[in-house]
Image (cartoon, rainbow, N blue to C red):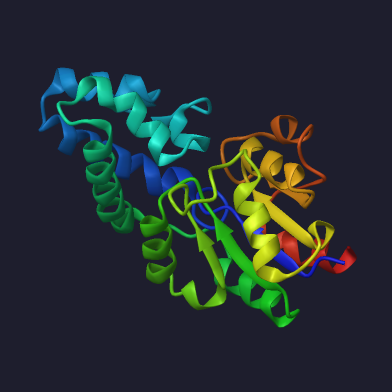
Amino acid sequence: MIKAILFDKDGTLIDFEATFAPATANVIEALAEGQPDKMAALADAVDFDLEGLVISPGSQLVAGSLDNIVSCWTPHMPEDHAALLARVDALYVQNSLESLAPVDRLTETLGTLMSRSLQLGVATNDSHQAAHAHLDQLSIAHMFGFVVGFDSGFGEKPQPGMVEAFINHCGLSPDEIAMVGDSVHDCAAGRAAGAVAIGLTTGLATQDDLAPHADHILPALSDLPELIDRM
């Protein structure tokens, strides 16, 4: 029986492309100070179509941590990595809040899961600061007793550290935990920790991408309560 659920954030709780395509364009423009050549270089470094606002499925923007994204940009910027990371984190928080879009029936679905007395958490490769800002903006922060980012001290997905930390937080066995996410990294992290891996095709990963790594695959987050009830 599943007693607790750990969610990815981007592409799982929030609409990834609707939120991060415009936010990324604004972040790049700010970093490049509007210089076209520099904007193009920064966009190319993360496989982002700046003109069409299209994120490539293989981009670090999809499953990489914020640290991975900044590593792509550091060679093009005057700051050292740590300084650039802090600046990019702040820029992304500011700009993503302006375009933040929840997935369909988000609050309703989370409320249904809470009514089953399930413990809920969030583990994202975004920053801890951004995770809390997004949950607050969506008025769902109170639903999660555990929220970690790549910079919270538990490593980043696909490593199992975040999931293991949630297991310890809940005081449960791994097979009583479900890790829910839209990327291969999410499912791989769940499996590596011994949790049930549930993939969603709500991001850029397809069912074929997720199938080797997920125990279950759903087309929408709103389908999750029914699956949990069956399990």
Looking at the picture, tell me which residue is in the foreground, 226 or 169. Answer: 169
215 in relation to 205, above or below: below
Is residue 53 in view from this perspective? Answer: no
Q: Is residue 212 left or right of residue 11?
A: right
Report whether 141 appears left or right of 171.
Answer: left
Q: Look at 48% across and 60% down and name the residue there.
A: 102
Q: Nearer the viewer, residue 143 or 226?
A: 143
In the rendered image, which quarter contains the C terminus? bottom right
Relative image position of residue 15 (x, y in whole percent): 49, 51
Q: Is residue 64 visible to us here?
A: yes
Q: Is residue 151 left or right of residue 94?
A: right
**Residue drawn 33% across and 33% down?**
70
Q: Residue 123, percent across and down?
A: 56, 55
Asked if residue 153 is positioned above or below residue 38 in the image, the reply reads below
Residue under the image location 72 percent in, 74 percent down: 118
Q: Nearer the viewer, residue 132 or 152?
A: 152
Q: Is residue 60 left or right of residue 220?
A: left
Q: Quadrant of the N terminus?
A: bottom right
The image position of residue 39, as x and y in percent, is 20, 25
- Residue drawn at point x = 40 percent, y = 62 percent: 134
Number of marks present in the image shown: 0
Q: What x and y, as percent, mark residue 182?
A: 62, 44
